Image (tube, coloured by chain):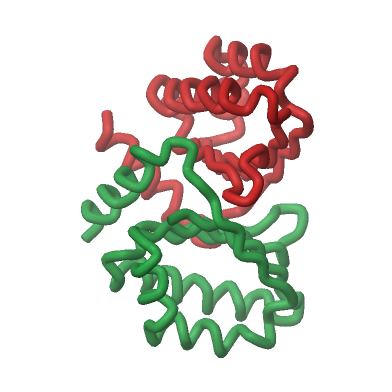
Chain colours: A red, B green
Amino acid sequence: MVRLSEIEIDPAYLEEYKTILKEESAASVKLEPGVIAIFPMYRKDSPTSVRILEMYASKAAYEQHLKTSHFQKYKTTTLKMVKSLKLVDMESLDAATMPFVFRKLKQDNE
Amino acid sequence: MVRLSEIEIDPAYLEEYKTILKEESAASVKLEPGVIAIFPMYRKDSPTSVRILEMYASKAAYEQHLKTSHFQKYKTTTLKMVKSLKLVDMESLDAATMPFVFRKLKQDNE
């Protein structure tokens, strides 16, 4: 399961938001076997436009992720900072190999 | 250097385009030391909306990439298939570690 989230952040909270997101994504990849990769980035010409490439082992792994304390903490603390949120479901063009590649990378880092 | 390309494909050429892109991205990652990662995907609700996450070691590595025969072949053969193309420059939120992580992954696969 691959997703590209498009998030617009209130400029007043940008630095605070980035710190919280960085913590949350690191915790997710580290603590959850079903989170294969979370890659947060932002547009160079518009730093309040955040994009997050997310990769989960399955829909169940994603639903589990939503229940974790680190995700819940991120969600509640950033609610007022997020101006808009679009969750765009993607399909990897090389679906057969890419999730495997990320999973292998994650295992190597453990 | 991180980029998220947004490409709209003529539906008549979609399958052909995807085959060519898959070949080109595989060749780039394999043959070019400066290409850290190329991750092509498309929107589930709009398969003609292709997104490519691209990671290069430097601007010079990217310019080198544009001159390779596999990129030139991709560019010329897909020209008529591409309806629109937006090259969006991104900044990794975790700039310090992510390119390293992808580079390590690539080395492991070599």
Residue in front for this viewpoint, A72 or A14: A14
Residue B20: x and y, percent? 52, 79
Horizontal side of A52 relative to A102 (left or right) equals: right
Q: Quick check: B72 above or below B57?
A: below
Residue A78: x and y, percent? 66, 19
Q: Quick check: A94 above or below A53?
A: below
Quadrant location, the N terminus of chain B: bottom left
Residue A3: x and y, percent? 62, 43
Q: Quadrant of residue A64?
A: top right
Q: How many marks?
A: 0
Residue in front for this viewpoint, A16 or A51: A16
Q: Residue at x 61, y 58 (%)?
A: B88
Horizontal side of B12 relative to B95 (left or right) equals: right
Q: Quick check: A24 above or below B53?
A: above
Q: Residue at x 76, y 59 (%)?
A: B46
Horizontal side of B95 relative to A66 (left or right) equals: left
Q: Residue at x 72, y 73 (%)?
A: B84
Q: In the orientation shown, which residue stands out farthest toward the front?
A: A12
Quadrant location, the C terminus of chain B: bottom left
Q: Quadrant of residue B10?
A: bottom right
Residue A18: x and y, percent? 55, 27
